[in-house]
Image: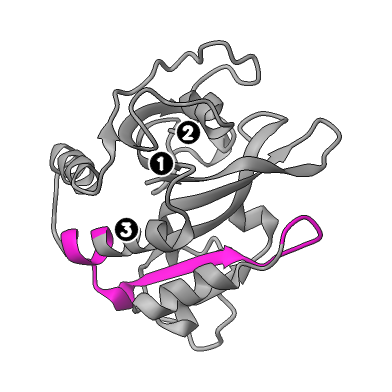
């Protein structure tokens, strides 16, 4: 596993996705433009909502950046080993271009080939399915085909494996989250990435935006399927 400072990590990430057809875009303002749903930019996708909804981005369908974010939803957790209020989120997007297979493959290759993280140190979670959307067997099988051990693939509910919308309405969908395994299994197989014991530390989230949440709580299909990742 490579040891990198933040500048090196930013460069490796942006170069990796630029080599795969993504245009590097600058970080947007921490104060959202024309968006009354939140006070601050909370994720890399936030400035891109119009394009996730179908508008054409001037730089094309594949984008990557390092976005400054402020997040207070989990402020009570700030101060432990993994939670911050202000941070930079590395992200890559497909605006109606590639989808689950390519996104997962990009993430796997960056983590295992560029950062040289051993495969047996990685675990993933995928959406277990509910009345709003089906179980994501495709993502689970894609991870397994790439090399993630089957026992390190976990199906979790919407609370854990669904992202968005950023406000009350807007683009959202099931996600697959990637974790570093920090210590061996205790043997009882009860612990999952939903546990807060510290065995699993989330490092990346790939969101498959397929739905537009309405004010009445219903979910309608988006006109285009998008990928939104945050690392």
Q: How many marks?
A: 3
Which mark is on residue 45?
2
Decide: marks 2, 1 in contact (CB < 8 A)?
yes
Name the residue: 72% across, 30% down.
168
Q: Which residue is tagged 1?
A: 93
Question: In the image shown, does 154 or 208 lie closer to the viewer?
Answer: 208
Location of the N terminus by quadrant is bottom left
Q: Position of residue 134 (x, y in %)?
A: 71, 64
Which residue appears at 18% of the width and 47% of the height? 19
How far is disc 2 from disc 3 in space, using C-alphas? Answer: 18 Å
Marked residue nearer the N-terminal end (1 or 3): 1
User: Badges 2 and 3: C-beta atoms under 8 Å apart?
Assistant: no
| Magenta region | 110-133
Of residue 62 and residue 132, the one placed in the foreground of this image is 62
Is label 1 in a helix, a strand or a loop? strand
Image coordinates for residue 60, horizontal then vertical, percent: 36, 32
Callout 1 touching callout 3 (CB < 8 Å) = no
In space, the residues marked 2 and 1 are separated at their CA atoms by 8 Å
Residue 145 left/right relative to 16: right
Question: Which residue is pictured at 67% across the width and 68% down the height?
Answer: 135
Look at mark 3 in the image and give the residue it sits on. Answer: 106
Q: Earlier in the sequence, mark 2 or mark 3?
A: 2
Residue 170 sits above or below residue 226 on the image:
above
Residue closest to the far bottom: 187
Q: CA distance from mark 1 to mark 3?
A: 11 Å
For numbered disc 2, what is the local secondary structure?
Answer: loop
The local secondary structure at tag 3 comes to: helix
Q: Position of residue 179 (x, y in %)?
A: 41, 62
Q: Is residue 197 above or below residue 210?
A: below
Dot 2 alpha-carbon crowd within 10 angstroms: few under 14, some 14 to 19, many 20 or more: many
Judge whether residue 14 is colored magenta.
no
């Amino acid at each position: 596993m490579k040891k990198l400072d933040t500048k090196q990590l930013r460069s490796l990430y942006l170069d990796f996705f630029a080599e795969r057809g993504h245009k590097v875009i600058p970080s947007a303002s921490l104060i959202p433009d024309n968006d009354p749903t939140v006070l601050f930019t909370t994720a890399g996708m936030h400035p891109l909502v119009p394009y996730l909804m179908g508008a054409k981005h001037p730089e094309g369908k594949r984008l990557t950046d390092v976005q400054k974010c402020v997040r207070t939803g989990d402020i009570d957790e700030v101060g432990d080993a993994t939670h911050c209020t202000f941070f930079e989120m590395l992200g890559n997007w497909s605006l109606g271009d590639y989808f689950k297979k390519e996104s997962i493959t990009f993430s796997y290759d960056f983590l295992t080939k560029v950062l040289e993280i051993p495969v047996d140190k990685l675990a993933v979670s995928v959406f277990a399915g509910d009345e709003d959307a089906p179980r994501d067997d495709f993502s689970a099988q894609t991870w397994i085909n790439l090399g993630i051990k089957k026992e390190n693939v976990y199906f979790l509910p919407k609370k854990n494996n669904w992202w968005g919308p950023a406000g009350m309405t807007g683009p959202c969908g099931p996600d697959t989250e990637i974790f570093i395994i920090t210590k061996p299994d205790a043997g009882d197989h009860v612990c999952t990435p939903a546990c807060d014991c510290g065995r699993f530390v989330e490092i990346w989230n790939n969101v498959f935006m397929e739905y537009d949440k309405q004010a009445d709580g219903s979910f309608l299909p988006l006109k285009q399927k998008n990928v939104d990742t945050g690392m």
